[in-house]
Amino acid sequence: MAGLPPSLRGLLQQFGGLVGPGNGADSQDLPDTSEQVYISSLALLKMLKHGRAGVPMEVMGLMLGEFIDDYTVRVVDVFSMPQSGNSVSIEAVDYVYQTEMLEQLKRTGRPEMVVGWYHSHPGFGCWFSGIVVANTLLMADTDFMLAAPTIHVAAAVGASWTDVSTQQSFEQLNQRAVGVVIDPIQSVKGKVVMDCFRLINPHLVMLGQEPRQTTSNIGHLQRPTITALVHGLNRNYYSIAINCRKGELEHQMLTNLHKNKWNDALKLQNFEDHHREREEAVASLKSLSAKYTTMIEEEIKKKPEQLLVDRAGQVDAKMRLQTTLDTLVTDTLLQSLGSMISTLVF
């Protein structure tokens, strides 16, 4: 640095990221970004249901909520959008539909603002497609927020966007907007495969500065996969911790979601469907009985160690036979009992 001309030295000092710590650059304390996104149970259920209904296509929707403070984003509800896509691109957002839907929701007592968007990646993990990020992100102000829907509608006609470009459009309206990616195929009971992202400002990347730092021990981030790292995670966008917190009312709602009632067993099934299912069950009993007979013959001829290897990954005919038989007898008795009660009462 000492041998450089003053003009060049001043230019390098302006671009602090291009000057390493050993070259005299002052270290700057970056603000803490221990930010979390709280997603309600209702919003999570609606996202999973929408994503599962769209398999194998990608689907998207908007998330409603509020920005509580600098460290908290609360999502209370979501609604689906009529767009679909594939692993490469997604249809342009219909902003006319979005505006009309928000107006209708306000009439029903849902005044929350749009805090981000969600879309599904059925079967291939959580990451953003389209790692080419524009060099400039427009900063949000009042004039732009008023004019943005018109600008976006004009720019989005006949266009197909990537996940990154869609996220850019939301961050132009609000810098804190987030994008949630959910995988309805890999999600199982008790574990939802999802992640939340926000773009990294390309100005900071060009200057070589750290985009963010997390110093809080609240929550935990998702462990990045190789696929996500290849698609630009921690280079073009970063992950935000997600917390799904249940309140008392939400716990009561989830408890009563699939709760059985005492009169469910008395409901009559369609007689044609009942007859067809009984025929299929009897036919399966015949094939399972033959498999079970073969299993007994093998137990006599083979050793237990050999049977353990031969039956690995195969259907247990005995257990399947018992389950099918119990279901057949129970359904037949309930259908007959319900028919008799309906005949006497009605």
Image (tube, helix red, strand yellow):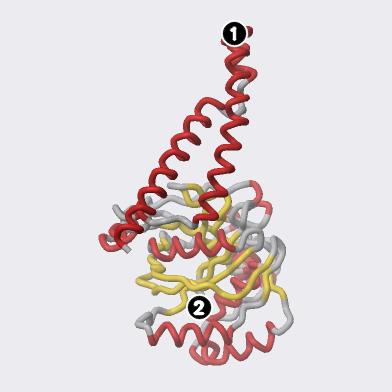
Tag shown at residue 174? 2
Instruction: Judge whether residue 134 can be spotted in this image.
Output: no
* Residue 39, position as x, y percentages in the image: 41, 63
Quadrant of image for the N terminus: bottom right
Say if 33 sits above or below 137 in the image: above
Which amino acid is tagged 1? Ile
Instruction: Judge whether residue 127 can be spotted in this image.
Output: yes
Q: Mark 1 points at which residue?
A: 300
Q: What is the distance, in whole Å, between disc 1 and disc 2 at their CAs?
A: 72 Å
In front of the other: 87 or 321: 321
Say if 285 sits above or below 70 in the image: above
Would you identify the image quadrant in which residue 153 lies?
bottom right
10 Å crowding of disc 1: few (<14), some (14-19), many (20+): few
Which amino acid is tagged 2? Asn
- Look at the numbered disc 2 and give the secondary structure of its residue: loop
Sooner in the amino-acid sequence: mark 1 or mark 2? 2
* Residue 331, position as x, y percentages in the image: 43, 45
Residue situated furthest left in the rendering: 248
Say if 342 sits above or below 75 in the image: above
- Look at the numbered disc 1 and give the secondary structure of its residue: helix
10 Å crowding of disc 2: few (<14), some (14-19), many (20+): some
Quadrant of image for the C terminus: bottom left
Name the mark nearer the viewer: 1 or 2: 1
* Residue 314, position as x, y percentages in the image: 61, 27
Q: In this view, does 183 lie to the left or right of 84?
A: left
Q: Residue at x 63, y 7 (%)?
A: 301
In front of the other: 288 or 28: 288
Q: Which residue is drawn at 38% across and 80% down?
A: 110
Q: Is residue 9 left or right of residue 176?
A: right
Residue situated furthest front in the rendering: 344
